[in-house]
Image (cartoon, helix red, strand yellow):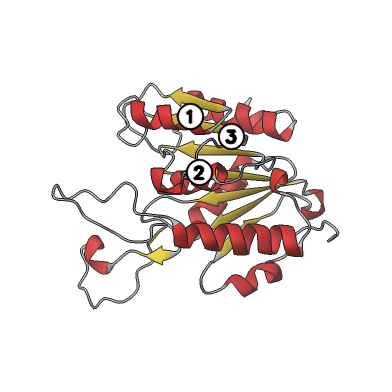
Amino acid sequence: MVATRVPTEADFAPLLPQLAVKLSFPSPPESTTSILLLFHGLGDAETPFAGFAHSLALPGVLGIAVRGTSALPPALLGLPPDAGPTSNFHWGDDITVGPTGDLDPDPGFEKAAGLVMDRLVRGVLVGTCGWQLDDVLMFGYGQGGQLALGLASRVRGGEAFKGVVSLGGGLPPSMVPSESGREKATTPVLVCHGRESEAVDEDAIALLREEFADARIVQWKRASDGMPESRDEVLPMMQFLAERLDTQMPAKWS
């Protein structure tokens, strides 16, 4: 059995170039008791989410912001096809544009799931550094929230993450285990969304309640999804995280 220790930058070097991360340590780093994986939305990158982890100021939590596993094609950003790799990333296996010009809401997540779960979580965090799945929280926005929920959905049979927060992202049907008669996933999940969200609609909420034993849904007053913009939008997320960490909320959010 591997002795538990705080991960270092060097532990994640073998994941490159397929998976890049940016760390945000608590102060001091030796106070780490839990780990928060952060997954950005479609077209974003890891650096802003490392800053978001730092701003949360969760006591004893090491934030690991993960870069999407594929770069967006230049054409989707209005650039020439030969412009070279972009700095905007996504988590899907493919990018499919429908007849209305919208991207496929469930592009498949097998590549990202394999890299994150097998190499980052089970390889580095568990195998190298001695942590357990129930030491790991996940936070995701949009497509990143979909990935987080999908990973949690696949962990069953007595295993569970510490918790998942998804903002404006539902559970992708492609990531739901296909075995019949399966027990519900026991990772507690919180999904926050706008009142006119297209990503978290009635069908998405029904699927969450069908697949998770503890699925909490918060509808914001504003119409759109997005990152939290007010104390009322932040508070449910901070209450959930404080509960999962068995600690009080940082004073700045209370």
Residue designated by label 2 = 179
Q: Quadrant of the C terminus?
A: top right
> Regarding mark 3 in the picture, which secondary structure is present there?
loop
Q: Marks 2 and 3, how far apart in space? A: 10 Å
> Regarding mark 1 in the picture, which secondary structure is present there?
helix
The disc labelled 1 sits on which kind of residue? Glu
For the point 44% across and 40% down, which residue is it?
A: 171
Position of residue 110 in the picture relative to residue 240 (left or right): left
Residue designated by label 1 = 210
Position of residue 200 in the picture relative to residue 113 (left or right): left
Mark in front: 1 vs 3: 3
Few, some or many residues within 10 Å of mark 2 (<14, 14–19, 20+)? few
Residue designated by label 3 = 183
Q: Marks 2 and 1, how far apart in space? A: 14 Å
Q: Marks 1 and 3, how far apart in space? A: 10 Å
Q: Earlier in the sequence, mark 2 or mark 1?
A: 2
